[in-house]
């Protein structure tokens, strides 16, 4: 028989091991456990941004959450911080416009400094804008309005000799930047208030040089040098970003918060619990799973605002469907019939439930000062039936069974697709099938026009009509419906060279109305931004483009 | 046993290479472009991105990354998160997932074995019914429900200040996620232990041991458990794989920046470099755990010759 004494020794060792296990296990984690203590009484503004930060590299950036952080840490010649978020001088103090409205001469603010104390000079803008062309990204096309920029980019892409001297971006002295456009752009100051036009600090990026561009890691602390009211001091992947007030910022005296913490959290329940517990003061986009409930309960801090985006159906207008059969949607009357037979208010009242405005036009009304759309198509089943009969499908007879595509990660779109199927069956007698696919497949099917009808959305990038209308140019890479109309292209070309803002809006209004009436897309509703803001937060005005003037945000004591 | 370890360690690179190639094939044929952004991107931009990531063709990809991995243990840059390398991501997320997984495993094994043994000893008694209930709940209630309930519990007023709600700040914040993750394997282990314990309890040597005058609890916890634990041991391999890779849901609900979410999200993002990195790391863990379990067989039951017959 084995000795009981030996057993108890084993047992003791086992017990000891179990007791020792947790500290051993947790030891490697404790490097990330240290919580930076906040200076006494200083206000740290914690907020939950939409999803993860994808990138803070100006060349690669395209997501709203990334822009939101960028507005806090960087600044351009102008910033969207004026009344109604209009551009106002920031890195520049003033601008002169030539009589032909093509040459802008920006006078830089002499006191403007980088976060390391270096002065911000015109060469920093030239460097950054050139980099946008050298290493193109999603928003490089915005610079193509500058004289010679498009040709320069094309030459680089084709590996042909390209001369930056031919591009209309010149630093005439350290504090003067001269920009020459190919044609007048009435909204150019809106463009330069957008992050792709912000300056960058070349010396701090030098270690990250790779080929013609830079490795995106130049944006990470401690290497990153920026020129905005805040500076990025800590970035823990998928966890948090810490932004501290930039003491070298030219207007640091007017910055209210001492620090901002961007918390990553994409779970609706835990977002809400964190807000209720006071751990965060602002949720930028309340997830659609919970927003309608919070709205119905009139939760304190919950607010909505019409967004600069529209939810719509895109219709494939090619003569043939991906399957090779003849496409009935190639007939304008069929597209109109489909648009006229959707009861959109049913969708906003029963599915999306955030008080979204029903859409009959492509561009969200009231989001662009001075612009109003012409009325589009409403809900008129009788006319829809007539149009369908005229197109050769009386009572829907002989109409092929077509699929409606949606991305299955989006429960709202899944439910909208079901409603459409049901309404078209009821109102027109046409059978549709619905097809849900995973999101990357969905994007690929749309961009390669491998779909018939698809549920999509478009948000404007800068506050001008063209951010919507350019999408449906025959030559546009974004024209997923492949609707091609020379008259439409002509109107946009005319508008692009029209220097008079009122006349230009008239041309664009006519162009937009062609989209609304010829129906390459069927607008369903205009989006609403739903956010939660703690009552202690001051200086935050919710707006269509979800912009924040970080300088003005403060916490009430 | 030394032979077994050597043999398995020699096998490891080969198995990992096969896993790499299979994963690569699946990743490459999957529809959807890793570089697709919110909008359709200009072909010139896509071309420049593909060149940066050595992703112009499968051959270019295979000519670059495997050498980097073998030579420098460098998995390359994430295609989705351009500021971060796959190594950065794994380094920050893996320790959290491993601790969470091991924590769940410890809870599941200790509680599962104790409850299972007690249920077998008091067969038909209230503790047996209780263990059955726990097992039923653990197996049939999905982890996202348990996780959500525990998350709400952590936010309740009488636990305020104990846990950081929906954040990972201190190790204690892994307690509730660990419990949520442990539920299913714990239930399974409890049932396994009970069944095999009942079997052992009725065997002759138990009666002999008791007749010799050994105490009841000594016989149960020392003699019986050692025999009854074998099925549980063989389950620990798959259970470890489950807790490591299955932590996605729990990580998501509790907002824990672990590797589980990258395992799923990298596929949704078609982040090829990250997918391959995460799959290789997980595979290594699962293989290592299976080896440990095999070795443990030999320790618990010397009759099993783990190294022989090869």
Image: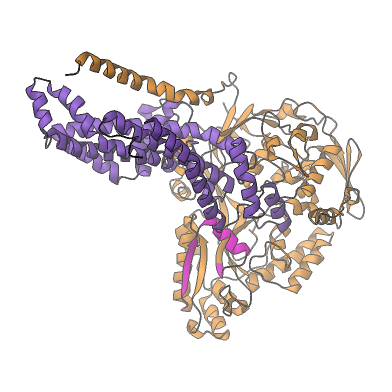
Q: Is residue B167 visible?
A: no
Residue A245: x and y in percent read 68, 27
Residue A271: x and y in percent read 48, 39
Chain B, hue in figure: purple
Q: Is residue A447 magenta?
A: yes
Give the camera-side residue of A528 and A206. A206
Q: Is residue A448 visible?
A: yes
**Split into 4 quadrants, where in the image is the N terminus of chain A?**
top left
* Residue A379 located left or right of residue B180: right
Q: Is residue A518 magenta?
A: no
Q: Which residues are magenta?
A: A430-453
Residue plotted at (31% across, 21% down) = A14
Q: Is residue B213 depicted above or below A205 in this figure?
A: above
Residue plotted at (22% across, 13% down) = A5
* Residue B35 located left or right of residue B268: right
Query: Which chain does the orange colour mark?
Result: A
């Amino acid at each position: 028989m084995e000795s009981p004494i030996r057993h108890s020794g084993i047992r003791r060792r086992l017990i000891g091991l179990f007791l020792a296990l947790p500290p051993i296990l947790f030891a490697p984690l404790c490097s990330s456990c240290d919580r930076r203590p906040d200076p006494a009484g200083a206000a740290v503004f914690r907020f939950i941004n939409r999803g993860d930060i994808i990138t803070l590299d100006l060349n690669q950036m395209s997501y709203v959450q990334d822009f939101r952080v960028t507005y806090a840490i960087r600044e351009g010649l102008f910033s969207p911080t004026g009344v109604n978020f209009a551009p106002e001088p920031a890195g520049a103090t003033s601008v002169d416009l030539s009589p032909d409205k093509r040459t802008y001469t920006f006078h830089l603010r002499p006191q403007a400094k980088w976060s390391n104390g270096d002065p911000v000079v015109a060469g920093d803008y030239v460097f950054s804008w050139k980099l946008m062309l050298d290493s193109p990204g999603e928003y490089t096309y915005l610079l193509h309005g500058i004289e010679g920029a498009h040709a320069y980019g094309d030459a680089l892409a084709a590996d042909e000799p390209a001369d930056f001297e031919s591009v209309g971006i010149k630093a005439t002295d350290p504090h003067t930047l001269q920009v020459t456009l190919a044609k007048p752009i009435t909204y150019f100051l809106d463009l330069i208030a957008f992050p792709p036009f912000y300056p960058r600090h070349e010396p701090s990026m030098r270690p990250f040089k790779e080929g013609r561009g830079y490795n995106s890691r130049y944006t990470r602390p401690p290497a990153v040098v920026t020129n905005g009211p805040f500076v990025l001091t800590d970035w823990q992947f998928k966890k948090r970003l810490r932004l501290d007030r930039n003491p070298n910022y030219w207007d640091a005296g007017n910055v209210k918060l001492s620090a901002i913490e961007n918390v990553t959290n994409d779970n609706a329940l835990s977002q809400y619990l964190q807000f209720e517990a006071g751990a965060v003061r602002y949720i930028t986009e309340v997830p659609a799973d919970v927003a309608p409930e919070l709205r119905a309960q009139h939760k304190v801090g919950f607010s909505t605002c019409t967004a600069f985006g529209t939810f719509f159906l895109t219709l494939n207008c090619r003569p043939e469907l991906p399957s090779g059969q003849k496409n009935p949607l190639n007939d304008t009357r069929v597209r109109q019939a489909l648009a006229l037979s959707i009861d959109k208010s049913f969708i906003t009242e029963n599915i999306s439930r955030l008080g979204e405005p029903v859409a009959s036009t492509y561009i969200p009304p009231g989001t662009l000062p001075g612009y109003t759309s012409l009325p589009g198509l409403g809900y008129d089943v009788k006319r829809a039936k007539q149009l369908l009969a005229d197109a050769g499908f009386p009572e829907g007879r002989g109409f092929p069974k077509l699929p409606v595509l949606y991305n299955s990660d989006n429960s709202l779109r899944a439910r909208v697709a079901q409603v459409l199927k049901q309404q078209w069956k009821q109102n027109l007698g046409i059978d549709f099938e619905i097809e849900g696919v995973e999101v990357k497949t969905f994007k690929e099917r749309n961009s390669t026009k491998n779909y018939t009808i698809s549920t999509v959305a478009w948000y404007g990038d800068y506050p001008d009509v063209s951010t919507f209308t350019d999408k449906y140019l025959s030559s546009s890479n974004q024209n997923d419906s492949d609707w091609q109309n020379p008259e439409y292209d002509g109107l946009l070309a005319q508008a692009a060279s029209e220097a008079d803002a009122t006349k230009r809006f008239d041309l664009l209004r006519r162009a937009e109305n062609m989209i609304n009436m010829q129906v390459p897309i069927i607008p369903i509703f205009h989006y609403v931004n739903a956010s939660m803001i703690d009552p202690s937060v001051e200086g935050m005005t919710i707006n269509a483009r979800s912009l924040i003037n970080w300088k003005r945000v403060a916490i009430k004591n | 046993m030394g032979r077994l370890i050597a043999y398995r360690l020699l096998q490891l690179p080969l198995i990992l290479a096969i896993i790499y190639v299979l994963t690569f094939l699946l990743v490459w044929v999957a529809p959807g472009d890793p570089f697709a952004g919110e909008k359709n991107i200009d072909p010139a931009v896509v071309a420049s991105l593909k060149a940066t990531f050595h992703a112009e063709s499968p051959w270019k990809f295979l000519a670059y990354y495997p050498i980097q991995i073998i030579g420098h243990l460098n998995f390359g840059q994430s295609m989705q998160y351009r500021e971060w390398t796959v190594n950065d991501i794994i380094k920050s997320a893996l320790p959290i997932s491993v601790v969470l997984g091991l924590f769940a495993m410890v809870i599941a094994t200790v509680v599962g074995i104790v409850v299972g043994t007690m249920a077998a000893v008091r067969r038909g008694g209230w503790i047996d019914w209780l263990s059955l209930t726990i097992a039923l709940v653990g197996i049939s209630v999905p982890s996202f429900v348990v996780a959500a309930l525990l998350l709400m519990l952590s936010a309740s007023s009488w636990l305020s200040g104990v846990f950081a709600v929906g954040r990972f700040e201190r190790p204690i914040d892994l307690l509730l996620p660990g419990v949520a993750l442990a539920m299913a394997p714990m239930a399974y282990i409890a049932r396994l232990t009970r069944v095999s314990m009942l079997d052992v309890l009725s065997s002759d040597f138990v009666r002999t041991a008791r007749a010799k005058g050994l105490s009841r609890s000594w016989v149960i916890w020392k003699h019986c458990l050692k025999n009854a634990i074998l099925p549980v041991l063989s389950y620990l391999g798959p259970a470890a794989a489950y807790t490591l890779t299955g932590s996605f849901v729990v990580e998501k609900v509790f907002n824990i920046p672990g590797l589980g979410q990258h395992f799923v999200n990298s596929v949704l993002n078609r982040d090829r470099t990250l997918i391959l990195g995460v799959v290789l790391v997980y595979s290594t863990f699962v293989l290592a755990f299976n080896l440990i379990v095999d070795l443990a067989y030999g320790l618990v039951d010397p009759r099993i010759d783990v190294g022989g017959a090869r």
